[in-house]
Image (cartoon, rainbow, N blue to C red):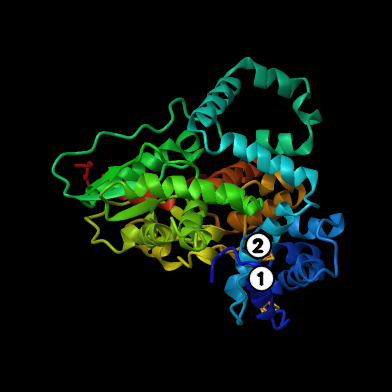
């Protein structure tokens, strides 16, 4: 069944729900609010009412409950009936967006994403402006004079959650000679600007495992943000461009270190199922896509040196619930000498990042982050590891706000540190 179901497919997906309620205790918004309408089961009932015509598709109270969903897919993991909630929600949002009653806010969000995501130069220019702002006296002045505090809440949330951008964005490094196996790596839209160190670590690890890493020049955003915003047309357009870019190269796999991107890329086959020109290549692209942690854990690791830290691991929703990758990050962390892994009370519960969620639903995002920080503090860990740039940003913001002395890393960075500690410079 394609990830984006047609009307018939949507009805079939909805019909799989037997209303048992096993998903309720897995749903972050239900746990916060205790309301059926903000639970998976309740949202499925609302979507069913919309799709059968019993409720107007654009009714604001109804869409509010859909908007509050993080699309974290924890309900999918909990559901014994295999209800594909992610597909149901993406299809419902897509149907609203493509109908006459799409709310203005949804249209504006999709239009803004269309102006930015396909254009790497525009993203780079925006990031350069932001970098300049963060390093200028203007930020301090705005803070001291209270101007930032008077900004609309989404802007305030964005300003507070952004990490200080490194001086230089990621630049694809020259590859060591003599490596015979080749993988392609997704750079992503904002990750090269926010976390170039994670990309550098990923390339070094892959090089040490014997892989040459290539970066297709024509790569664009994976389309996840557009898909979650209901803009299926744009998500498909971006997917086609990535398929053309990546399948040109002679590669064994497409490696991704952003769980949200990897999850969408693994679903390209379903996204383009109805496109005869791309169906076969989209399925091939999806089958070649690997999260870096599942890719690396299947390899024979070289000697690892000691990294003496107490680590807690936050599952990224789109790694654990969408890609079902749970053990690989933990196996890698346990393989590193010196690491003490201390599990969170609810490691697979969303931290409130969820793509644009922290901007469009800042209040719920802040509640989820506050709970997550309580859990982090309880572990006493001095490193918080995860597998997605959005989670990294959100967790860093939480640690800053709460004054918790810990650093946030991607798991691959700890593996890179361990390889370096063993004396293994990249070849
Ligand atoms: S667990 Fe699955 S079948 Fe049960 S209510 Fe939730 S979505 Fe429906
Ligand atoms: S995707 Fe997440 S927030 Fe949305 S209904 Fe499922 S568990 Fe709740």
Labelled disc at residue 91: 2
Q: Nearer the viewer, residue 30 or 247?
A: 247
Please name the residue shown 39% across and 47% down the image.
244
Q: Quick check: marks 2 and 1 in contact, CB under 8 Å?
A: yes
Reply above or below: 157 against 7.
above
Q: Give the quadrant of residue 137.
A: top right
The answer to whether residue 169 of the structure is visible from this angle is: yes
Mark 2 → mark 1, Cα distance in angstroms: 7 Å
Please name the residue shown 75% across and 59% down the image.
66
Q: Position of residue 132 (x, y in %)?
A: 56, 20
Are there few (<14), some (14-19), or many (20+) residues within 10 Å of tag 2? Answer: many
Please name the residue shown 22% across and 41% down the image.
425
Labelled disc at residue 186: none
Q: Which residue is mark 1?
A: 10
Answer with the quadrant where ligand 2 appears in the image: bottom right
The answer to whether residue 225 of the structure is visible from this angle is: no
| Residue furthest to the front | 276
């Amino acid at each position: 069944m394609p990830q984006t179901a047609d009307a018939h497919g949507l009805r079939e997906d909805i019909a799989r729900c037997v209303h048992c309620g096993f998903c309720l205790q897995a749903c972050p918004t239900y746990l916060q609010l205790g309301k059926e309408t903000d639970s998976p089961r309740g949202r499925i009932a609302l979507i069913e009412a919309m799709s059968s015509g019993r409720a107007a598709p654009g009714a604001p109270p109804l869409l509010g409950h859909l908007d509050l969903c993080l699309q974290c897919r924890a309900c999918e993991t909990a559901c014994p009936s295999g209800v594909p909630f992610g597909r149901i929600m993406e299809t419902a949002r897509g149907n609203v967006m493509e109908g006459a009653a799409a709310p203005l806010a949804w249209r504006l969000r999709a239009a803004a994403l269309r102006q930015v995501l396909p254009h790497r130069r525009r993203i780079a220019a925006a990031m350069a402006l932001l970098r300049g702002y963060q390093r200028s006296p203007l930020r301090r002045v705005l803070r001291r004079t209270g101007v930032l505090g008077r900004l609309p809440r989404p802007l305030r949330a964005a300003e507070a959650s952004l990490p200080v951008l490194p001086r230089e964005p990621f630049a694809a490094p020259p590859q060591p000679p003599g490596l015979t196996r080749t993988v392609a790596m997704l750079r992503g839209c904002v990750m090269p600007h926010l976390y170039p160190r994670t990309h550098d670590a990923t390339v070094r690890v892959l090089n040490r495992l014997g892989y040459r890493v290539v970066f297709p020049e024509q790569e664009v955003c994976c389309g996840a943000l557009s898909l979650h915003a209901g803009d299926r047309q744009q998500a498909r357009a971006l997917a086609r461009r990535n398929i053309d870019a990546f399948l040109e190269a002679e590669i064994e796999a497409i490696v991704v270190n952003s769980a949200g991107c990897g999850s969408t890329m693994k679903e390209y086959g379903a996204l383009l199922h109805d496109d005869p020109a791309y169906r076969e290549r989209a399925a091939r692209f999806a089958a070649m896509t690997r999260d870096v942690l599942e890719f690396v854990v299947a390899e024979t690791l070289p000697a690892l040196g000691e990294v003496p830290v107490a680590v807690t691991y936050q599952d990224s929703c789109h790694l654990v619930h969408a890609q079902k990758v749970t053990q690989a990050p933990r196996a890698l962390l346990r393989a590193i000498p010196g690491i003490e892994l201390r599990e969170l009370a609810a490691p697979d519960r969303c931290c409130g990042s969820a793509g644009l969620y922290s901007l469009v639903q800042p209040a719920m995002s802040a509640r989820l982050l506050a709970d997550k920080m309580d859990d982090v503090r309880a572990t006493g860990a001095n490193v918080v590891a995860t597998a997605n740039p959005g989670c990294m940003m959100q967790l860093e913001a939480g640690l800053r706000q709460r004054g918790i002395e810990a650093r946030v890393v991607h798991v691959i960075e700890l593996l890179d540190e361990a390889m370096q500690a063993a004396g293994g410079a990249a070849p």
